Amino acid sequence: MTPREIIRKALEEGRTKLLEHEAFEVAKYYGIPTPNAVLVKTPEEAYKYADEIGYPLAAKIVSPDITHKSDVGGVKLFIKNKEEAYKAVEDILTTVPQKAPGARITGVIIYKMAPPGVEVIVGGLRDGVFGPIVMFGLGGIFVEVMKDVSFRIYPISTEDALEMIDEIKSAKILNGYRGQPPVDKQALADIIVKTAKLLAENEEIESIDLNPVLAYPQGAMAVDVRIILKQKG
Amino acid sequence: MNALSKFFQPESVAVIGATPKEGKVGRAILENFISRFKGRIYPVNPNYDEILGLKCYKSVKEIPETPDLAVIVVPAPQVPQVLRELGEKGTKAAVIISGGFRETGTKEGAALEEEVVKISREYGIRIIGPNCIGIFDNWSGVDTFFTTKMRKPPRGYVAFISQSGAFATALMDWMAYHGIGVSRAISYGNKVDVDDIDLLEYLGEDDKTKVILMYIEGIKESRGRLFIETARKVSLKKPIVVYKAGKTSRGGKAAASHTAAMAGDYSVYKAAFKQAGVIEVESFDEMMDVVRIFLDQPLMRGNRVYIVTDAGGVGVMLTDALTNAGFEIPVTPPDLKEKLRSILPPHNIVENPIDLTGDADDERYIRVLELLANREDVDAIVVVALPQIPGLKGTFVDYIAKIKEETKKPVVALTIGSEISIETAKRLQEKGVTVFESPERLAKALKALRTYSLHVARFKGL
C-alpha cells in the first residue's frame, strides 16, 4: 500500500495513530531504513517467514487498543530460530487476549532486531506558523533531560541536516569517543531530509517520531516509527 | 514600484481626524507632516475650516485630489466609514492609528476589525495597523509617530520594524541620543494587512536602508515559510538583525509526541532565523552593538583576528573573549614577527596580541596597523586604544580611521575609561571605526559579523 492508502485506511477506521507495520511501511516508502518486518496473524506464518527475515527476531503484538505492549505479554525478544518464532507468536496470541480482554488484535509484527548503535531521535511536526519542521537529538537522557535538540524548517537540504546534527551540544558523542568510531552522519542527514519530505507530502500527518534511530559507523536505521495523524474536524 | 511605496513616498497625504487641540494625536501627526513632509497635506475634520494654517476638509470626499496616503486617527467605530470613502476616492494606502479593535478583546472590537479587513480588500487598500504608531520615515518626512517627546534620530541607514510601538519610540529616542542614523521605522500594531514580510521585502529594495532591525513577538499563522524565503533573499543584500521576544515555550500544551514536547515556539523560531540568514540577538546591548558593526564594517572573510594593544591585560581579556566566540588569534608568523621586530622597540611584544606597551605613541600604532592591514592572513583587526597613556596624541584616531578606510577588513576598537576614553570613542565612531567598551560585547558583535559573512558566502559566494 502507498502512504496515502495506509493513511486513508487508518482515518476510515477512526485511528489517529498508525500501527507499527503501517508506520514502517510509510517510512520505507520514503527510503528511511527500517528493520525487515512482517505482520503475521498465526504462529504458522511466523514459522514460515522467520528464516527469510533473519535472526535475532523480535515479535510484538499489533493492536490499536494496546499502548504498553510488554505489560500484557505482547513482546518477545531475541528469538533465535523458526521454532522459537512459532512459540513466541503462539504465546503472544494466547496471553494478550487474557490480559487485555476486548482489545482488537491486528496481528503480531516480527522483525529482525537491529544491532546496538548510538541512539538518536529524528522527529517531525507540523507547526502553525512554519509548516513542517524536523527535529534531531541524541536519544534518552539527552533529549528528555537536557533538551539538547536542533530544529529546521522544511524544505531542507542535506547540508542543512548535517548542520543540524553538528549543532546539538552533545554532537561530540557522534564523532566517536572512548575508542568508538564516528557514526555515519551522512546516513542520519539522509533520514532527516526524508522525514521532512514525508511530513511535507502527507498533510494528514500531525507528527512523526523515529525513536530511536540507531546510528552506526556505516548506515543508520529507524527501529521504532510513530506516526500520529491529525484529529479530524 | 513596490506595493508599499505609497506609504513611504507619497506625494500627498490626508490626515483624517486632524485637530488643532494641543496634546491630541491628531495634532501631533499633523505637526509632524507640516514640519518635514514635502508633499501636499490635507487635514480632514468636519469641525474646522482651517488647522495650523492648512485648509481643513469636512470629509474625505471634499479633498480636491486622491491622496496617496491616508492617516486615520478617528475613533474606531468611524474607521469603516472613512475607509470606504477613501476607497471610493481611490486611495491605496492607509495607516490606521486608532485603537479599539481586536486588541480590546471585545466582540465589537473584533467585528470592527473584520469590517476594516473586508473594506480594504474590496477597494484594494493596503493597511498598516490598526492600533499602531505607524511610520517614521526620516527621508520622506512621513511621520505618524505621535510621541511628541521623542527625539528624532538623525537621517541614516538603519531601518526598524517593530511589533511594539512603545519600544519603537524608545529606540528612536535612544538612537537620537547616540547619534545613530535611521532611515525608516515602522510599527504595525494589529497587522491586519501589512506585516513583517511585506516590510522586509520593501526595505530590502530600499537604497536608504543598509541594516534592517526587527523586533518581533510572533509571525502570523502560516506565514513562516514566506518569512524565511523573503528574509533569505533580503539577507543577501543587507543584514537583518532580529530580536525575538516571548522566548518562553507555550506551557501546558499536551504533547502527542517527543518532537511536540521539545518544539517550544522559540526553538522553532531560532531554526527559522538560522535558515533565513537572519542574525538573532539576545539582548538590547547586543542588538545595538550588532547594528553598529553592520553599519560600519565590511564583511569578514576569515576567522583570524589580530589584536594591537597598549595594555597587555586588555589584550588577554580580548583573546579569551574572541576565542570563546570561536575566533582564531593566530600566533604571529615568522615573517611578520621579523618585520614587527624591525619597527618596534625591544620591550614590545610581537606575539599576537601585539603589545605596544604603556610608552606607545601614535607612530608605533600606525606602523603596526599598516603592516597588518595589507596582509592576506589577517581577517580583522582589533585596536585597543586606551588613551590614558602619555604618548598618544589626538591624531592617532585619524590614523586608525584612515587605515579602516583603506583596508577591506573589519577594524574595530576598544577603549575603557572616563571622558578621555568616551571622547576617543566618539571620534573613532564618527569615522566609521566601531568602538566597544567591553571585550565580551566586542567579541559577540564581531561574531555576528562573521556569521553573516559566512551566510553571504554560502549563498552568494564572496
Image (spheres, coloured by chain):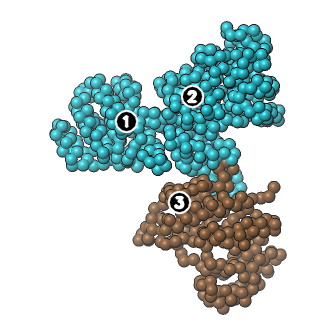
Name the tint of chain B in the rendering. cyan
What amino acid is labelled 1 in the image?
Answer: Val
Q: Which mark is residue A158?
A: 3
Label 1 or label 2, whichever comes before in sequence order? 2
Q: In this rendering, which labeled residue sits more in front, label 1 or label 2?
A: 2
Drawn side of residue B209 relative to residue A199, left or right? left
At 67% from the left and 86% from the top, the residue drawn is A49
Q: Is residue B266 left or right of residue B391?
A: right
Q: Which residue is mark 2?
A: B184
Q: Which residue is mark 1?
A: B412
Q: Tell me which amino acid carries mark 2.
A: Arg
Look at the image and tell me whether residue A9 can be seen: yes
Tell me which chain the residue with mark 1 is part of.
B
Q: Residue A205 sits in which quadrant?
A: bottom right
Q: Chain of mark 3?
A: A
Work out whether residue A198 or residue B21 is closer to the camera in this orientation and state it.
A198
Is A67 above or below relative to A127? below
B80, above or below B192, in the image: above
| Residue B321 in the image, given as x and y percentages of width and height | 39, 44
**Secondary structure state at the residue bearing disc 2:** strand
Secondary structure beneath dot 1 equals: strand
Mark 3 vs mark 1, CA separation in Å: 36 Å
> Could you say where residue B85 lies in the image, as x and y percent from the top left?
79, 24
Q: CA distance from mark 1 to mark 2?
A: 26 Å
| Chain label for disc 2 | B
Q: Which residue is painted at 35% across and 49% down in the image?
A: B328
Q: In this rendering, would B191 be left or right of A55?
A: right
